[in-house]
Image (tube, rainbow, N blue to C red):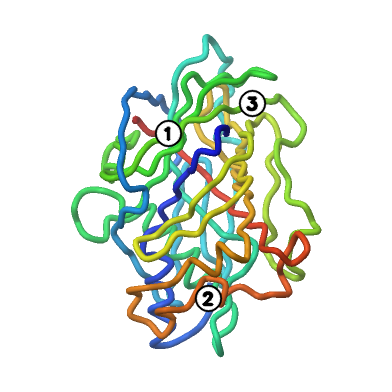
Amino acid sequence: MTGGKTLNLILTGGFLGGLAALGACGGDDGGGAEGTATVTAGSSSGDSGSATQSTTMSTSESATMTTTEADTSSSGGQTTMTTDPTEADSSSGGTPAAAAFRFNSVAVRDPHFFAPIVGDVTEGSVNMPLNMALNADGDGDGLFDLGFILAFDPLDQSDGGTGAVTFANVQCNDAADPTMCTLRPMTQEYPTTYTSQADGTCQAPNPDYLGPGYDPTPQSTTGPCFVTAGTSVSIATSSFALPMENATVAARYVGDPAGNLVEGSIIGFVSQAAADSAILMGTGTPFDGMPVSALLHDDAKDDGDTGWWFHIDFTAVPATY
């Protein structure tokens, strides 16, 4: 990713809704069918910090999202991602073509979020609500409550292959297969480039940046896979924006042409200043007026205690865009 462009991951009120549940009870409990995808060209503009529909989940509930290739479940208060190699598409690749993939699971792995008195709320109040929003239509408008997409044009999976890839915040039909997604109103597309490799590791967490004792730990992305160059990323909700620097995105291809993306990872740096400026507002919780940094432990800071390296796992399934 180049040119200092900002990539907006609109995580919706799911995070804030999870925090709202803490005000009442506390606690920290914690489909990928093969297909084709198309990309339509176009331009858009607007405020990247638009609000999206909130889906909340109490900390005593658990959610299981099962897909053909990637299974995201909550078990024992932890969100896990597994892959089923029997579902991989073993077809040989041909001429590279456009393809798009919608995120169907997201999990913040490091650093963890901690609420006063309650403790670690990463699974029950962050990851679980986010996954519900990615896979549910809470307001009944026929669209998933949250959507991110990666659109490749073309998708070149050959070793050393490269091309254009666009990240966008999207609204996706909750019934179509593959899901049809369009750019979310008042947001814009963020084009960049990627590089594929046949084997080896595309991206792995630096153990020096990981908190001790976190389980599960952030995953590595192994070949066949792709990785983007570093860029600035702004993780935004309807109530705050959290700028992330030097962010990279990677994922493993399942099949050729790919039918799914698994072992996805987003790694980026959030400075102390950025976390301090991300003020929680309009949450209806005791956390209103508090900065995001208040939910992050100082002893988890990296780079000379100047901020935190975030590690976010994801999987994605085919979509049209």
Residue 130 image position (x, y, % from top left): 43, 60
The correct choice, above or below, for 233 with respect to 36 in the image is: below
- Of badges 3 and 2, the one in the foreground is 3
| Local secondary structure at mark 1 | strand
Horizontal side, residue 108 vs residue 12: left or right: right
| Local secondary structure at mark 3 | strand
Q: Nearer the viewer, residue 279 or 52?
A: 279
Q: What residue would you read off at disc 3?
A: 195
Q: Nearer the viewer, residue 249 or 83?
A: 249
- Image quadrant for the N terminus? top right
Q: What residue would you read off at disc 2?
A: 29
Horizontal side, residue 196 vs residue 163: left or right: right
Spatial CA span between label 3 and label 2:
37 Å
Residue at 33% x, 43% y: name it.
187
Spatial CA span between label 1 and label 3:
19 Å
Going from N to C along the chain, the mark reached first, 1 or 2, is 2
Residue at 32% x, 48% y: name it.
47
Q: Are marks 1 and 2 in contact (CB under 8 Å)?
A: no
Q: What residue would you read off at disc 1?
A: 318
Q: Are marks 3 and 2 in contact (CB under 8 Å)?
A: no
